[in-house]
Image: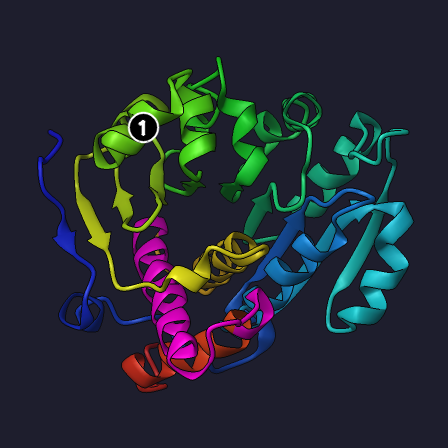
Amino acid sequence: MARDTAQPIDVELLESWSLPSSGGDKSDRGTVLVVGGARQTPGAVLLAAETALRVGAGKVQVATVADTAASLGVALPEALVEGLPALQSGELAVAGADRVVELAEAADVVLLGPGLRDPDCADLFLSQVVPRLETAVVLDALGTAYLTGNLDGVRHLAGKVLLTPNVTEAAAMLELDEEDVKQDQLGVAQRIADKTGAAVLSGAEVSYVVTPAGECWSYDGGAAGLATAGSGDVKAGAVAGLMARGTAPERAAAWGAWGHGDAGRRLEDESPGFLARDVMRAIPAQLARLDGGRDRR
């Protein structure tokens, strides 16, 4: 049953939700596969993939358009980068779907959506991928276009799927007016969770984490400067990386929202003009400050 109010995501809550160990072999800390990007937006998958590594994922793979794969491999030498066919527009082509499913078989978490630019192309591509996945999934940004008119599309992944739509994407998923979503962001997140069977991380100035069981939490401690290009890619990479380490989707969402927001707040104290990559580099210290780097195995 849905709640009218949300429990705050604060130090007390997160200390009761200790993160899994970040020690041990890289294989013990999980593999994240990031799928997305277009010819014009390679930075989105770069930010998401690097953030996943920085929050403790053991390995990262990136599947993106072949045009940018080589340069991404140089920018992120720690990752395996797979080039996929692209449409003339620069979007991922359906011809690459089979390869993504193959790569997903060796991943602990698949992050779908960063850098996708066209909702119709995203839906077409992901409709050939998501139904065939069995591993944990994060659907981010225009990856959520796959669920518009298809809200049951991730029910086969119940318990291991997280949706991270912003206000615009949440409105599209439920085919609502964006202004209506802004007026009831918690209620909309609850509706999405109920209709999809997925955990949800959504919101604007306030971030809400909601489960299909009606549990809900909120975080309102971020900074205005987080409304910058690439910030959402960083947050998505953070939650995917934490899930790869073995954190439940809703707990990864709460830790990710807090780490992202707290990093932004601290950066804003230092400079009014910080970038998404600055947030990416600041999140690990925030997580370690609270979790203490203790061995959680």
Main SS of the magenta segment?
A: helix
Nearer to me, 215 or 176: 176
Stretch of the chain drawn in magenta: 249-278
| Vertical side of 177 occupied by 266: above or below | below
Q: Secondary structure at mark 1?
A: helix
Q: Residue furthest top?
A: 149
Q: Is residue 20 above or below residue 69?
A: below
| 18 relative position to 170: left or right | left
The residue under the point 45% across, 32% down is 168
Q: Is residue 8 visible?
A: yes
Residue 191 screen position, x and y as percent: 27, 25
- Left-right relation of 227 to 5: right
Q: Quadrant of the N terminus?
A: top left
- Residue 246 in view of the camera: no
Residue on which disc 1 sits: 181
Residue sitting nearer the eye, 179 or 278? 179
**Outermost residue to the front:** 272
User: Quick check: 173 above or below 85?
Assistant: above
Report whether 206 appears left or right of 196: left
* Magenta highlight on residue 268: yes
> For mark 1, does the 10 Å Cα neighbourhood hold few (<14), some (14 to 19), or many (20 or more) residues?
many
Instruction: Tell me which amino acid carries mark 1.
Output: Val
Q: Is residue 135 above or below residue 46?
A: above
* Coloring scheme used: rainbow
- Residue 202 in picture, x, y percent from top left: 35, 42
Residue drawn at x 79%, y 34% is 91
